[in-house]
Image (cartoon, coloured by chain):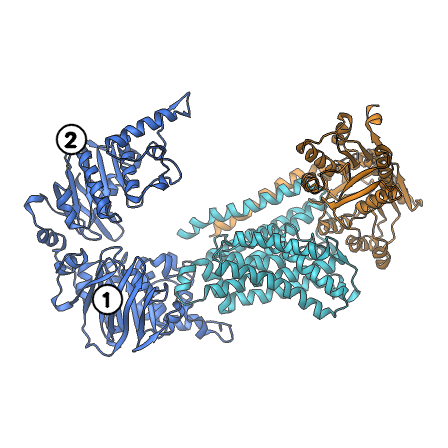
Amino acid sequence: MTTRLARARQFGTVIGLLVLSAVLWALSPHFLTVANLLNIAQQTTINAVVAVGMTYVILSGGIDLSVGSIVALSGVALGAALQSGQALPVALVVALGVGVACGLVNGAIVSWGRLPPFIVTLGMMSIARGMALLFTEGRPVSGFDEGFRSLATGRVGFIPVPVIITGVVYVIAHVVLTKTTFGRYVYAIGGNEEATRLSGVSIGFHKTMIYAVSGLMSAVAAIMLTARLNSAQPIAGMMYELDAIAATVIGGTSLMGGEGSLGGTLVGALIMGVLRNGLNLLGVSSFLQQIVIGAVIIGAVLVDTWLKPRAGRG
Amino acid sequence: MRRAEWRTSVAIVVLAFAVAGLSCNRAAPAADDKPTVALVLKTLNHPFFVDMRRGAQEAADRLGVNLQVQAAEREVDVEKQMQIVENLIQTGIKALAITPSGSREIVTALVKAKAANIPILIVDTRLDAKAAADAGVQTEAYIGSDNYAGGRLAGDHAVKVTGGKARVAILEGIPGHETGDSRLRGFRDAVKDTPGIAIVSSQPANWERDQGFNVFQNMLQAHPDIDLVFAASDLMALGAIEAIAAAGKTGKIRVIGFDALDDAKKAIAAGTMEASVAQFPSEMGRLAVEGAVKVIRGEKLPADIMVKLEMVTKDSVKQ
Amino acid sequence: MRGIRKAFPGVIALDGVDLALRAGEVHVLLGENGAGKSTLMKVLSGAYQKDAGEILLNGRPVEINGPRDALALGIRIIYQELNLVPHLSVAENIFLGSAPTRWGGIIDWRRLYANAGQLLGDLGMEFSPQTPLRALSLAQRQMVEIAKSLARNASVLVMDEPTSALTSREVDQLFTLVQRLTSRGVAVVYITHRLDEVYRIGHRVTVLRDGRHVATTTLDQVSIPDLVRMMANRDVGEHFPKVRTAPGVELLRVERLRRRGVLDDVSFALRAGEVLGIGGLLGAGRTELARVIAGADRPDSGRVLVDGKPVSLTGPAAAIRHGIGLLPEERKAQGFVGGFTISRNIALPHGRRLGHGGFLPGGCEERLADPIVKELRIKGTASQPVKLLSGGNQQKVVLAKWLAGDAKIFIFDEPTRGVDVGAKVEIYNLMNRLTAAGAGIIMISSELPELLGMSDRILVMHHGRIAAEIDAAQASQERVLSAALGLAG
């Protein structure tokens, strides 16, 4: 939203990212190098793309816990298609189709079954994971040709391909969210579903599409992850839902729906990426990293709640 | 509004400094000019890897090198492990010892280490030979237990204690892991020539204690006459022991595990567990650091450095 | 209670109201919607703080600063929605939070059930204290609520429309119980809309109107028509700028609409240039009728015709396509998206028309909204979210949503509720302009002067049915109120 409040919140997150970077720069000589920054960019891509779908869903007042499992299922579908000798474009369409199908099922049950999204996507989280394991008998599908792997390892100029993919995804998703009727309805449904319904907007159709977008984003992430690992693991993507929710929330999107932006989510994902990278560089143990990331999530939301009443008056 | 922005940044600055404060202690030793060896583990929430770190740290202190130990939050998260490797490469480490979370997947990250001229030592879990060859990744050495030999050891023991006549159940680890697959292969090969041994059920319990409990409880439902269980790790074996106790069959079913964890040794001493194949993770840690230091000095290592395995039974645990 | 005064932003809800209660009496509190009955009782129970006046108990002034104070003084209110826990037993509900305990914390079950049993016996109730509450009928639950009040030694008991959902046999039981209460010296304040009940149970009556005290009298001195007159007869000080337009063709016809529990065989027609007022008490089915016509709820049977042709209202979108626009009762919950700007709210129903292949051209929402914002003089900046506007401006935004389209049938549900005087007049003027341009308006209102002042024709609803149709020229507050109360006439 272009309200002053939202802009201030986003600006605050950007400042947070810059300050965090400055601190890491002061602490580690290895942080501010071109190679390391490209590392961070690449390491952030998967979470950032999953978080695009999560942002759509959360903006509409929902939640999607199934993203990680959809990453796994789309990934193994992609892997199987590639190994069975399908052409790359066909395999990509299969992966994206699987992701969208899972999202459509989520959305349809949320809309017409009138169940809470938490329950529906919790169920899908288990179903998609189980299907991925069943389909592969628990074994990863691996070993792909160079053409496919270049989706992760390739570079255009000096920029890694996944970073470019992520950039394109963000531009398109941002345009859809801010310049189309669909995007407007995402915010409207999250802001006041009943008023939106009484304005003649089909809530069922649009909610279904919103979850489909989330499934699509999971599939895009699955493509990048499979190319990066050179392997499609049925156990891939565990806990991705929590990382994506964290990035979205740190980026200032309200869990109540209706407020937030993709720019914020990108910054949120970058904050998490920078933090993980920096803590690695400093040799901080993985246990401590979890504590720090948890603290940042709570801190960001705390700042949000401080901000709101004040901005309301100002 | 300006106030609000100010608050946001202050909150994050405070957090960042808190992080920095916590991390300074750890980062400090890297400031001198001793070479740094990185040891990347699958996880640190398993006693096996904690022992490995201890052995490695002792060796590093003795040899005068810095040791950086890092691990992902979860054992199966190979993508996180890749990120850790990528990030460590940036810090100018002189050698990388790693226990791969995914035998094939981690190869991509090792390609980057190779490109940065960092020698690589593989510990505990072997790389997938084909994937490594395809990517042109050469490693200095593999340091680990011979899991296949360990599996055979367990199989031979099973034949011996049952007199060659038993109905056997197997608890597998996560499918597709070289470690677990080799142990199972070794066990099966050891018992296959004994006609009295029948493997009635073999299912994965994903290395976990609670899944070991659940899966074995289900197996007992289907096959109440099981005589012996082989679990590819002690955690799963300990879960099975609890399931046996819950079914009131303690002492009637022999349990053979792998890893000889402290809890397993206690169970063996108490008689609720038959035996466990002991690995020596701290030895692996020691050999990994020693090997890394040799490589840094320009010495050559043998391709495979095998760490001894030992059958721990009631007799040996008492000593 | 003496000289109680309570003001809300823009409204004076209570203006110097007196109420005296005697021990052992049933004091009936009467007044139409918004007369101040609930507000007065909320002041008494500590839910609201009074702005002026004093409350005396047994002759001594007392301070009631919150619900706790009221409870401590023995003042209890039984609301229409009962405050009971369905899966606990009757006894546990009665002593919820004050159960007898021993050894510092362990509930003494034997004593709990004995005490509860005694209390139920005293009140002449026949069910066991161990009965789970969910097994009881609504009337029995109400009695449990009363027992709960007595367990805390209530000396003043307020009952807010206790019989609205009861059968006549249950009403008898309740009245017997109320008589037992008064014989124990409890003062009962009884709020109701059923005038027939008033004489059966009450001793004295106080009538409120527009937040003012009209009269207090013993019931044997007044008749039902007297009471109606007292409730209705207020000075119509407000001026309504009504401009009459000659009615044109029929725009909307509703035939035999039924919806289980809320609408019962409703038929009427709306013509171009006409304001059709709909009066009635809360819960009479007015809002439900509006929602059915606007496509928000589906009727069980009956049909709706627009321009003489039957239409299928499958949802709000279908209603909007047929030119029906709803100004909902709950503006904040149903009328607008609080976080959206004025233009985005106004453009919300028109996305399909504004979009080019799904894309919204830059500034198209503003171009649509700006002329209407100017016309309605909506005050607010371009980037301000609507939730930060005043009630009047919010209402204008909701109106503007429909003015931006081609709606010709408007349903205004309480259009001026929570709106300041200036904005009210603007809304009335707008209604005149709409009817002059050939639109038809259905206006639901609980404000009798507004209903009489702005309508051409008035339908009065009672229990989901249309109880009366009155031409505005012959309408009076008494007639509307009598019909709304279900009295013949």
Disc 1 chain ID: C
Picture colour for chain C? blue
Q: Nearer the viewer, residue C259 or C73?
A: C259
Q: How many callouts does the rendering have?
A: 2
Check the image and report above or below for C48 versus B311. Answer: below
Chain letter tied to orange:
B
Q: Which mark is residue C59?
A: 2
Q: Is residue A52 left or right of residue C61?
A: right
Q: Residue at x 86, y 53 (%)?
A: B129
Q: Is residue C19 left or right of residue A57?
A: left
Q: Could you tell me which secondary element the residue under label 1 belongs to? A: helix
Residue named by callout 1:
C428
How many neighbours does mark 1 have within 10 angstroms: few (below 14), some (14-19), or many (20 or more)?
Answer: many
Chain letter tied to cyan:
A
Q: Residue lying furthest left in this view?
A: C221
Q: Amino acid at mark 2?
A: Gly
Disc 2 chain ID: C
Residue B129 visible in rendering: yes
